[in-house]
Image: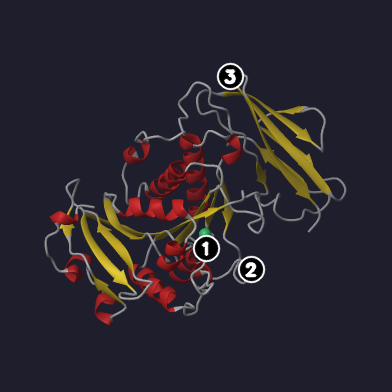
Amino acid sequence: MRRETLSRRSVLAATGGWSLITTGVASVVGDTARDDSGDNSRDFIVVREGTAEETTVFVTTGAVDGPTAVVVGGMHGNEVAGYTAAGRIADRSIDAGTLVTIPEANGVAIERGTRTDDEGINLNRQFPDGETPGTRLARALWDVVKESDPDILIDLHESTGLYAGDPMDGVGQAIFHSAGDDATAAAADAADYVTETRVDDPALAFQTGPFSEPDTDPTGLLAHKAARDLDADGFLAETRSTDIALETRVQWHTAIVDRLLEGDLLFDDGASEEPADGTDGDDESPTASPIARIETQPPSAAEAPLEPGTTVTLDASRSRDPDGKLVAYEWRVGDDGPFEEAGETIAVPINGTGDHPVALRVVDDEGATAIDRLTLSTNC
Ligand SMILES: [Zn+2]
């Protein structure tokens, strides 16, 4: 951000009316500047000014009208890649619309390097649907979000576990999304995109999952509230924080955000395709492994108990090879034994109660393989 080039200009005029500024929940620190990479104007708003919770909101307005996106990082102070990526996103230029970035939502927790603040409060449980948020910080942040009236809200997080269908067991390497076909498709597209372009370990392929239902744990999440109270498409991205270089995780987050904004605030993905310094995500290498991915029809078949007698279709078509093509799809139904079935999709009848583990093995044109697994079950 080139703050040295800022020229004074009325923020209210520039943003078309941030009534926050006049109602006292926030104040302006920066002024508006033209950006040298295009016709972006930039404003800065401070929330909880003068308190330990003070944090800056960055508002970038593109040259042409378009949707509004809010990007949030640092809800949890130990999720470094999320707030590092959000900080970079705050500086990025957009082609259209408005980008509101809150890179360090919970400054106290970031300062402490902990999930919660110094009173043990988990900020991302303070946003109940349809109600006033639970803390002064949450209310101040919600005022900014509400005033922005976003079409899209993306909240960036990290997890030590990996998502495998139940958010209570781990949520890393996943994009959670609000209900509706558009958000569901956008999450799947972003997961595919980041996996294809920046993930070389098939075990770290990004998955997607729906937001928990209202009144189902976890509750009080900002992204859920934005979706339910403001009708935004809500996304919550989670990288795995353990055993992966910070820079790699930051790039995963920025690639996910870029992809989710493409077509709305960004008109080409050139920026997100730039080679990254010092990353290990070089998927163009001739030895890249294929990525196996099982999808089910019905879509929730691996997450909800199935009626005995149901037939589930397993679909491998979202599997891929970053540097070539897949030449075989092989399936195993049952605990162990050979991969006996072949084909991009197979039908699995659920005969009898209990667990039905299945595995997909894909083979690429260099003979490299990858495996994805899931369990179909009649149990709750
Ligand atoms: Zn988090």
Q: Is mark 2 within 8 Å of ligand 1?
A: no
How far across and how far down the image is residue 102, in percent?
Answer: 36, 62
3D distance between C-alphas at marks 3 and 1? 44 Å
Q: Nearer the viewer, residue 47 or 268?
A: 47
Could you tell which of marks 1 and 2 lies nearer the N-terminus? 1
Up/down of 214 relative to 302, above or below:
below
As drawn, 169 above or below 53: above
Using the numbered discs, state the Cα–Cα distance from disc 2 to disc 3 in whole angstroms: 44 Å
Q: Earlier in the sequence, mark 2 or mark 3?
A: 2
Q: Earlier in the sequence, mark 3 or mark 1?
A: 1
Residue 144, x across and y down, in percent: 35, 70
Amino acid under label 1? Arg
Q: What is the quadrant of residue 326 in the picture?
A: top right
> Which residue is pictured at 67% across the width and 44% down the height?
296
Q: CA distance from mark 1 to mark 2?
A: 21 Å
**Does residue 232 show up?**
no
Which residue is under mark 2? 216
* Mark 3, residue position: 365
Vertical comparison of 212 with 243: above or below:
below
Tell me if mark 3 has few (under 14), some (14-19) or many (20+) residues whose alpha carbon lies within 10 angstroms of its own: some
- Residue 128 is marked as none
Q: Horizontally, is 80 left or right of 92 in the view?
A: right
Judging depth in this view, the residue of 204 and 99 nearest the camera is: 204
Rendered-image quadrant of the C terminus: bottom right
Residue picked out by circle 1 = 115
